[in-house]
Every structure is written in structure tokens, then in C-alpha cells.
Amino acid sequence: MLVLDSRVNNIYQFDQKTVVFKLHKANMPPIRLVVEAGRRIHSTVYAEESPAEPPAFCMMLRQCLRDSWFDSIEQYEFERIVVLGFRTKTGLLRLAVELFGDGNLILINPDGVIIQALFFKKMRDRNILRGEKFQFPPSTGKNPLKVTESDLQVAFESSGDVEVVRVLARSVGFGGTYAEEVLLRAGIEKTLPCKNLTPTDVAGMFSVLQTLLSSLSEGKFDPCIVVGADGAYLDVVPFHLRRYEGYLLKAFQTFSEALDEFFLKVRTAEKALASVEVDKLQAEQKRLKRMVADQEKALADEDAKSERDKTVGNTIYAHFNEFEAFLSKLVSANQRGVEWSSVFAQVLADKTAGKTPEVYIEGIDAKNLGVNFFVDGLHFGLSLRLSIFDNANEYYERGKRAKQKTVGTVVALEDSKRKLAKIERELSEAEHIRSLKPAEMLEALAKRKIETKDWYEKFRYFTTSDGFLVVAGKDVVTNEVLIKKYTGQEDVVFHAEITGSPFVVIKAEGRQITDQALKEAGEYAAAFCRAWRENVGSADVYWVKVDQLSKSGPSGESIPHGAFFVVGKRNWMRNTPLRTAVGVTVNETTCFIGGSVDAVRARSKSYVIIVPGDYQGKDLLKMVLKTLMLKLSKEDKEKLGKTSIEQIREFIPYTKGAINQKP
């Protein structure tokens, strides 16, 4: 089988019963094996979003099975139980997958003792408890691969008036669907009482049963999905069944592909339909529309206020002499000892008597020691504490401040409009999904299919700040493959002057490699060498052309796998500082990126610099995530909060270090 002899890279648990094994096999794309208790086991080409925090069962599987080798897969006695075998450092561990009833996943040690299970339970015939010996459940019927014609005859003869379909399904453990198929092909009515069967009937059933089993054992599959008249998926079968004649059948190359389409896509479609919160999106759309309207009104008001204050300043200068004469008279009276209250009283008396000056007086602002005017259609006040020049300048300054305030309002308005547009897209998609038929929904969800990865994604890699692809080996195997298979004559190869360093390659791709790219690749090579683990502050790095690397040492000395002998001059980068960076980009999707500091800085909305240190594992990953979040908006933090911190792990050498607080 395809999954056998593959290495378990990681394990994910997406809901209470569904676990996905990410498997690696040499010279093949990653394999994802989905195991759902009570329902299915098959490979999948679709990826679900990983939960931020893996459940306890998933963590136990990772602890026991990560980096193990997928050794075997067996069905127990034709029962709905599949046992997966994994070669680990502690021996052969088994995972029993129960596909009947509510289902269960049970991890078993080499001695047959239960380590962990999805569901612990006590039952009449056996217990699923930690520390107890694992026992298979009692058989529900005979193994159809071992049943004889005589066994069938005895089962039918002892069943009297019981319908033949019931006895056939129970006696050979074939299940109702395939028991009906056997009877249909044998030309026997499924409701016929067993006592009415003839030896010829039994022989016919046994012959059909052997034909079906032969197709299974010889791998003669013709997998397909049975599609209803309304486009709904009705069933998935390994070969054509008579009972589905007349239905539309959607064919597949392998049964695993058919299962993937049927279970994952239909199930995902159902989940998507159930999770579409149109009402919530509509409420958010209304809220954002109100916010946009309020911000547009505030922007218009600020613009109008700015323009008005500028006009008042111009008006003051236009009537400068009148204002100067009038205000000087009031100030002079006060300076001669007349109280302001008396000065204002006289002004109001003159206004009442019609003895107003050229400049029209509207009223007195005794509290703020000012006079209010109505001139050229404008209402405004002048302070007696300021000169006419300063009064005019105050209005000009107000206008400028109002104008500056509009800048922030414009930014907020644009942000609100972007959010509104995003919500409207989501609402449109949600309403579309709600209206789709199952077949149409599957097509809409096809975008979730995992695309074939580029060759460099099996290595460590990043893109320099000036656009060069930099690729690094992860271990001796990938070091060897990177140099032999993916490095060209124009590329540059880096290595640190210390055992335990990866090869790091700058891909020229027809361009002249820049000094900046050399600097960033050298920094990357230094960061991922063993010096990081030993908390060293810097390392010596050199680069050469690929034709300077040889698998033959001096005097025919053997060179170990993953290593190369360097011929000729080395271009040294002495005392290269050990540091790397992790950043986050928040666009349509949230994504962590890693690489040299300059490269990450150029592409990130938020980033942190990491240097050698003593923090490690999940504690360090959480620190990095927390620091990244401090530099993000509330909306971006919510997006990032849904992303697993495990994505950060590959960007930090040895998952060990400290955050540089002074980048």
C-alpha cells in the first residue's frame, strides 16, 4: 500500500473523532491519511484548518508516534476493525480503529496493553481502560473469507421464518447493503423466509459471495459515488452494485479517492452549510454601513469646519480696521479703570440704542472676555485678550487642526470600507452556499484541495528582501538531495565552519546574485548550524560555487552521506551573527514566515528577531506569538489567534532561543 514504509511527520485532530496522519515517503508528495472513528480510513487530498491547541489525545499520539514508521495495516477477521502498526524506538505500537457503532481509536503498546483511547469505557464483554490488555470485541458473524457453503446451509436451516437477508447479513458479517446485493445477483427475494430456500438457492448465494470476495482480494475495483437525481451523494462503493442500476455513477481511479470525495467533501459541505451564519454576517454588514455613514458625515463636518474657520480668518482681515478700532476702544476703557462689566454694559446699551459701529455686534461673551459678531453671513467671536492678528491666526490654526483631524478620519473610513467589502463578500458567499445543491456545493469547495507543492517546500526556505529564493537542507538526506538534484552551476552554496550545519543554496535563476542576498543567506546558514544550540553569538560562514563540491576527499577519502568536500577558495563571512526572524502576514489568509531579519522585515506586518537563548519548545513559541500580537490591530489579532503556533516551530533553530528586545 502507498502509506506503508512512510514516516509519520505529524498528527492532527480536527474534531472529537477525526485524526489525520501526515506521512512522508521518499520522492513523493506528503500523504495525508484520515482516520475517523466509526466511519472511515483513507488518504485525502484536502486540508482542514488545524486547531490552535491540539486535544490531549492528539498530543499523546504525537508523543508516541511522531517520527515513527508506518509498518502495517490489517483488518481484523473481516470485522469493522482496522489495526495500524507503527515502528517506534520503543517497539511496535498499534492503533486499533473501530469503525462500528460510535467508533473508537485505541493506542496499544508492544505488550498489548492500552496506552490511550478516544473513549474509555467498561462493557459486558471487555473493557477499554488505560493499563488493561486490549481485547477485540466478539465477532458479529463468520469471516466471509472462511465461510463454506455448508456453513450457509446450516445457518439458513436453523433460522426458520427469519428473512433470508437478515440471516445472510448476520452469519457472514457482510452487512445489510452487500447482503442485499448478493441476493439480488442470485435472483432471490430478500424477504423470503429461510425455510423456503432450496439447496440451489444456497449454492447460488455462495457463488455470488465468492465472486464479490474474489474482486476484493484481487483488487479488482471499479470505485464510484452514487449520485441522486437532485445531485446528492447517496453512497460510495468499491465496485458497481446491481441495486444502483439506473443511478448516475461518478467514477474514480481508486477507492480511496472515492471515499475522500464522498466523506470529506460532502461532510465539509454539510459543515459549511451548518456553520453559515448569514444573520450574523447581515448584522455585521449593517453595523459597518452605519459606521461608514457616521465616518463620512464626520469627515464632511470636519472639512466644513476647516473651511469655515479659514473663511473667518479671511473675514477678520477683510474688516481689520473696523475690528481694530472697536476692540481698541473697549480695551482702552478698561485700561483707564472702567470695569469690564461696565464696558460691556455700555456696548449693549449702544447696540440697543442703534449706536453700533460698522462692524455688527451680535453679543457679549463676558465669561471668556470676548465679543461675538455677525459679519458677511458668519457668526464668530473675538477675544479681547488677543490682538486682531492673533484672533485671525487662531481661526487659521483651528482650520489646520480640523484639516489634520480629517487625515485620521479618512484612514478610519478606508479601513471601515475594507471591512465592509470583506463582510459583503463573505455574506455573498454564505448566501450562495446556503442556496447550493450538494453537487454545486462540492464544486464551490474544490478550492480547498491541496495543490502540489513546489520542490523547495520539502526543505527550509525563504525569499530574500531583494527576491532571491534561498533553500536549506533539514538533515543529511535533504542536504544530499538539495546539492545533487536542485543546485545549478550559477547557484551559490553556503555552509558554516562547524559540524552540524545545513547546506544553504541561493537560487540564481538567471540573475546576478547580490551582496544583500549573500548577507541574508549567510545569516540563515549561521542560524541553523549547531552553534545556535550551544548559545554561541556568532559563527564563521563561507560560500562556494556548486562545482567546488565533491564527493571524493583527498587521496580517495570517503565522504559521508550529506557531506561534501570543498575544492578551491572559500569566500568567508567571518563572525556572522546568529539571529533569525519570524513574522506574520495578514491578508486574505494569516501566514507565518521565517528567514533572515531583513527578508522577514521586508514582508511582514509584524515580526520578532530571535537569538540563541535558553527558552525552548512551546514556551518559546507562545512568547513569539504574544510578541507578534502586540504589534497587530484587534482584527489581525483575531485572525492570528486562529492559527496554530506549531507553524512557528520550523522557523526557529532547534525550537530554542530568546527574543531580541532591541532589534
Image (cartoon, rainbow, N blue to C red):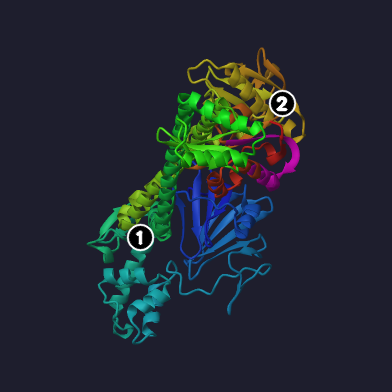
- In percent of width and height, residue 494 lies at 63, 23
Mark linked to residue 190: none
Residue 530 shown left or right of residue 276 in the figure: right
Q: Are marks 1 and 2 in contact (CB under 8 Å)?
A: no
Observer able to see residue 273: yes
Q: Which amino acid, mark 2?
A: Pro
**Where does the magenta region start and end?**
606-625
Disc 2 packing (10 Å; few <14; some 14–19; many ≥20): some
Q: Who's the residue at 71% across and 35% down the image?
A: 661
Question: Is residue 614 within the magenta segment?
Answer: yes
Left or right position of 241 against 300: left
Residue 237: assigned label: 1
Residue at image position (64%, 57%) is 60
Distance (Cα) linking label 1 and label 2: 59 Å
Residue 82 lies, with reference to residue 444, above or below; the image says below
Return the mark for residue 577: 2
Residue type at the position of mark 1? Val
Q: Position of residue 430 (x, y in %)?
A: 37, 53
Closest to the observer: 8 or 649? 649
Q: What residue occupies the far front of the structure in this picture?
A: 353
